[in-house]
Image (spheres, rainbow, N blue to C red):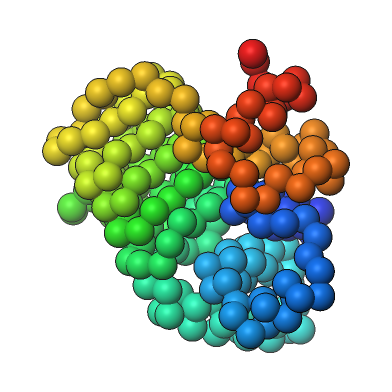
Amino acid sequence: MIKSKKEYLYYLEVDRVAKSLPYKINLAQRVKNILFPDYIWEFQKTLRKLEYFINCKKGIPALLNRYFITKKFRKLSFKLGFTIPPNVFGPGLSIAHYGTIIINGKTKIGANCRLHACVNIGTKAGYSGKAPTIGDNCYIGPGAKIYGDINIANGTAIGANSVVTKSFIEQNIAIAGVPGKKIAEVDTLDFLIPATQIVEKGLHKKSDLSGIPATELKKILKDNGLLDK
């Protein structure tokens, strides 16, 4: 949860790295971004700004700013098909595509989450407020459904169209099927970017990591001593 301006800027930078966007852009790229905006990135930036104002800013001027930020946030949410409340995701969120995504506001999801379209994460029917808690470095595939007062461990990959209704406390596993069950052990760094580690070590400023596939990036991180060999 963002609790200061410093954390707000940190979340923005980690989200940028998670989405594999460049650290610096030239004039041509700036013009392209104006003419053809990346609406998902615009949504994520607006989400973080709204979280900052909700959590940190008080007073009449802040309320006025928050009104206009909320208005933009709702417009982008409707445009993209997202129902994603503030203060759900930790730093390093990467939304892969446009399309319906529904997240209950009581859900808590850790750092470096890779999220695909048609995902629904919510409460068990008749139990409002009891939504999933999902750990760090988790990959949530297209069409996955995750319900109830359950816990999903760090490093979990949830397969496409899976339905998960019970806790999985073992780390680094793949879950798939209806109902969801463990099918394999997995390293989710093959599917997502550990953006928090990259930013905290300053690697994002030393080289352009944008556009590098996750498996290649994992090798770079190992070579730089940021991951176990």
Identify the residue at horizontal 42%, vertical 74% (top origin): 80
As drawn, 67 above or below 103: below
Can residue 117 be seen here?
yes
Can residue 43 be seen here?
no
Q: Nearer the viewer, residue 16 or 54?
A: 16
Q: Quadrant of residue 60?
A: bottom right
Q: Nearer the viewer, residue 18 or 179?
A: 18
As drawn, 14 above or below 24: above
Farthest residue, direction right: 206
With 178 as the anchor, is 77 left or right in this view? right
Q: Disc count in the image?
A: 0
Residue 173 appears at what percent x and percent y?
37, 24
Farthest residue, direction front: 28
Identify the residue at horizontal 67%, vertical 78% (top origin): 32
Identify the residue at horizontal 37%, vertical 72% (top origin): 81
With 223 as the anchor, is 20 left or right in this view? left
With 157 as the anchor, is 200 left or right in this view? right
Identify the residue at horizontal 47%, vertical 38% (top origin): 191
Residue 175 appears at what percent x and percent y?
29, 31
As drawn, 89 above or below 184: below
Q: Quadrant of residue 82?
A: bottom left
Q: Quadrant of the C terminus?
A: top right
Q: Nearer the viewer, residue 102 or 105?
A: 102
Residue 141 appears at what percent x and percent y?
34, 46
